[in-house]
Amino acid sequence: MSFWNRLTSASNNTDSIVRKTAHQVVDEVIRSVKKNIELVLNSRQGCTLCAPDFGLKDFNDSTATTRSLSQAIITDIRSNIDRYEPRVKISRIEYIPDPYDVLQLNFRLTCIVLLKQKNELTELNIILDSANKKFRVT
């Protein structure tokens, strides 16, 4: 949950204090991590002056094979998540080809989400949607 969202929800709930369960807290953190990863992966490198390496490179290389392209994207995804999402420790990223939709790129990210009390092992699916050319994290 972003800082602004916490402020607005706190101002709306000034009459009563709501205690969240540990499961709700973990769900909120994972939702926030997914949202941040989507933001990072849908940004293009060089789009911000204060962090010129923020975002993914342009992968419009007509000479690249599917294997070399997927490896380049995996490397770039790993470096961006390592740099800009400190709540995640990546165990593995793998390319999952979809034989029914060759224009859609699917990656599986196995990671540990770092929490205060305990760490949560999770798998996130990163999908480059061919229709809108945006990454989705599910």
Image (cartoon, rainbow, N blue to C red):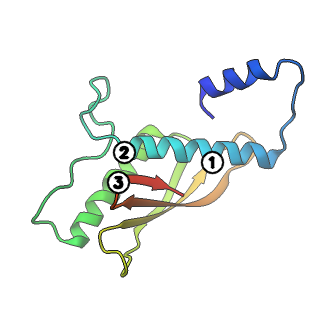
CB-based contact (under 8 Å), mark 3 and mark 1 = no
Q: Position of residue 66 (x, y in %)?
A: 23, 71
Please report whichever mark, 1 or 2, sits nearer to the chain's N-terminal start.
1
Residue under numbered circle 3? 132
Q: Quadrant of residue 95?
A: bottom left
Q: Residue at x 43, y 41 (%)?
A: 39
Q: Residue at x 24, y 47 (%)?
A: 57
The image quadrant where one finds the N terminus is top right
| Three-letter code for the amino acid on which mark 2 is drawn | Asn
The secondary element bearing badge 1 is classed as helix
Residue under numbered circle 1? 30
Residue 77, disc:
none
Please report whichever mark, 3 or 1, sits nearer to the chain's N-terminal start.
1
The CA span between labels 1 and 2 is: 18 Å
Task: Name the outermost residue toward the bottom.
Answer: 99
Q: Position of residue 18 (x, y in %)?
A: 87, 31
| Three-letter code for the amino acid on which mark 1 is drawn | Ile
| Three-letter code for the amino acid on which mark 3 is drawn | Asn
Q: Residue at x 59, y 54 (%)?
A: 112
Depth check: give the residue in front, 27 or 117: 27
Residue under numbered circle 2? 42
Task: Name the outermost residue toward the front.
Answer: 131
The CA span between labels 3 and 2 is: 11 Å
Mark in the foreground, 3 or 2: 3
Mark 1 surroundings: few (<14), some (14-19) or many (≥20) residues within 10 A: many
The CA span between labels 3 and 1 is: 24 Å
The secondary element bearing badge 3 is classed as loop
Q: Is residue 65 visible?
A: yes
